[in-house]
Image (spheres, rainbow, N blue to C red):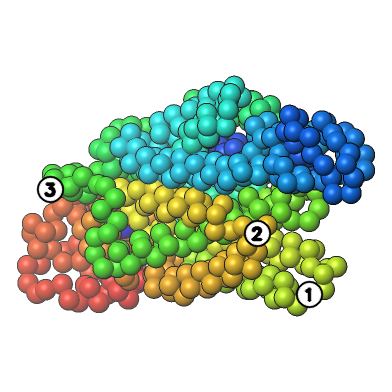
Amino acid sequence: MMSLDDIFHEIGGLNRFQLLIILCVYGLKIPSAWSMIQITFAGLVPPFLCNPNTNLSVETSSSNESFNSLSNMMKKKPNLNVCSLNGTSCQDFTFLGDVRTIISEWNLVCDMKWTKATITTIQMAGVLLGAMLAGQFGDYFGRKKTTYSFFLAHLLFNCVTYFSPNWQIFGALRFCIGATIGANLVMTVPYCSEYLPLRWRTLIPIIPMWPIGTAIFAGVAFLLPNWRYLHLANAALSAPFLLGYFCVPESVRWLATKGRMSEAFSVIEKIAALNRKPVPAYTMDVIEAVAAAEEKSRKAGHKYNYLDLFRGKTMVITTLVLGLHWIVLSLVFYGLSFGASSFTGNVYLNIFIIGIIDIPGNITVIYWSNRFGRKKSTIGFLLIGSLASFGCLATIFAAEEVNKGSILRGLSLAAKLGIAGSWVSVQTWVGELYPTVTRSLAYGFVNTASRVGGMLAPFAINLDDWIVFSFSLMGCISLVTGLLLTLIPETLNQTLRDSANTADASMQARPNVVINQIFTFSNKVPLDNGHSQKSAANECPQDSSKLYFNQNNNLDLKDNNSGDYSDIKQKFSNTGL
């Protein structure tokens, strides 16, 4: 049975149009990655000196020398990053260096230290909300409008954040920016994947747009170490990507499931023209079949929502395990990313490295995923992250102090590489486990789950104060999740499903194809009686005609009202169709 995957294969596969939509849509992850990781710099704590209350005369333990300012004491012995001096709590602080963060601007240290983790959690709560909204909006309003509406909001909120007067307003705006990031993460993968045939479907998640965005941020932050200016720079980077709205069409699959068949056909014509390929003759038949299947569901009164991800035992297990997996991925991924400032060495270099370390994992995913399947690839990379986390634990207790910092940084990067590889691999897997009508909902659900992990990350993964607990937690939850993923079915070499009517069958072996459907959709099986394929298929049930293979391995349509279809079923099975 021909499908939309076959159409996209015949009109170019990976060609000019596909490269265009990858650049315009998946490229939105570059400024989104910048926005996400920016909190790492904004929350950086520069070295600071304690300014005691100038109204008090404080005596040192060695002399009766009084001071009303910081300078005289600092000439003797600077005390960096202390919250009290000789029994007197600090009323103000002097931050050293040229770096300007929200910490130095609003004195968010000592008794205000909790605000850093809180603002990060607020941002991730926004990401969670955006993921929930985008999944529903993407299936209701369409992929294109949802994607670019949220991205426009992303640009505007970055501009407004520049004017934040205090950390409370900053936190509220970071929540809004987080919501736009969450929506972007939900929409970009399915939007692009729905335009790619089976062979190239694993390509989208491995393109290192996120690492590129992180690396660009690290370089700009080094040249422009001011949190306000970095928000304006992000808005400037985002602006050109909005032009993509005028270049890319709505998803053909979404249009077909909404019954907008002429629009879907028109989009395919434009894609074929851009790729310089002919439109397959069976294109409209496939679009009509997808629309008909969806219309049948709508007439039954079914409207899709997140509950559809939990219909049937297999779907319940699949959705719950995937949700847990994405929580773990986000918890470890962002715990290590936000903890980049805790590693030894230059903070900008650490942010750069922890971003680009994802690229080797991303590149190898396409081979492992296609060679061994989505399941083994996803679990394998996750176990790499688990083993590296346990390696960090061993280093803490066994390594020499002089080498401990470098070894921990190396193993932490290996853990993040494994987690990133698992995350890239599972994105393709998720898209293949759910049909078009609930695919955005599925991405919305797992991205929502991952934001729960992101919200917990600033508190659960603390590489400054709870390093043993942090690496123990990362290692254990990664291992347990890897074992649970074995319960989910493999989807390698399966076509994308469009209707929820085939959802249950997708979790099992591929079902037998009805002969009528083969004749309706296939132009590769010639008929000897001169009938068109579509008319022949429509006549078969009416006159109880039987189908036989002739000596040329073609199909003959012969009028014969006797007998059953057992022999033709056997002959069909022998052909591999």
Amino acid type of the residue tagged 2 in the rendering: Asp
- Tell me the CA gap for discs 3 and 2: 57 Å
Report whether 170 appears left or right of 452.
Answer: right
Q: Secondary structure at mark 2?
A: loop
Whether the residues at callouts 2 and 1 have beta carbons within 8 Å, the answer is: no
- Which residue, as the protein is rendered here, is positioned at the far right? 76
Give the CA separation, mark 1 to mark 3.
65 Å
Q: Residue furthest front?
A: 64
Q: Earlier in the sequence, mark 1 or mark 3?
A: 3
Q: Where in the figure is residue 434, as x and y percent of width and height?
A: 35, 56
Residue 114 in sight here: yes
Q: Is residue 449 left or right of residue 381?
A: left
Identify which amino acid the numbered label 3 is placed on. Ala
Q: Which residue is mark 3?
A: 300
Q: Is residue 243 left or right of residue 135?
A: right
Q: Position of residue 24 (x, y in %)?
A: 55, 35
Secondary structure beneath label 1? loop
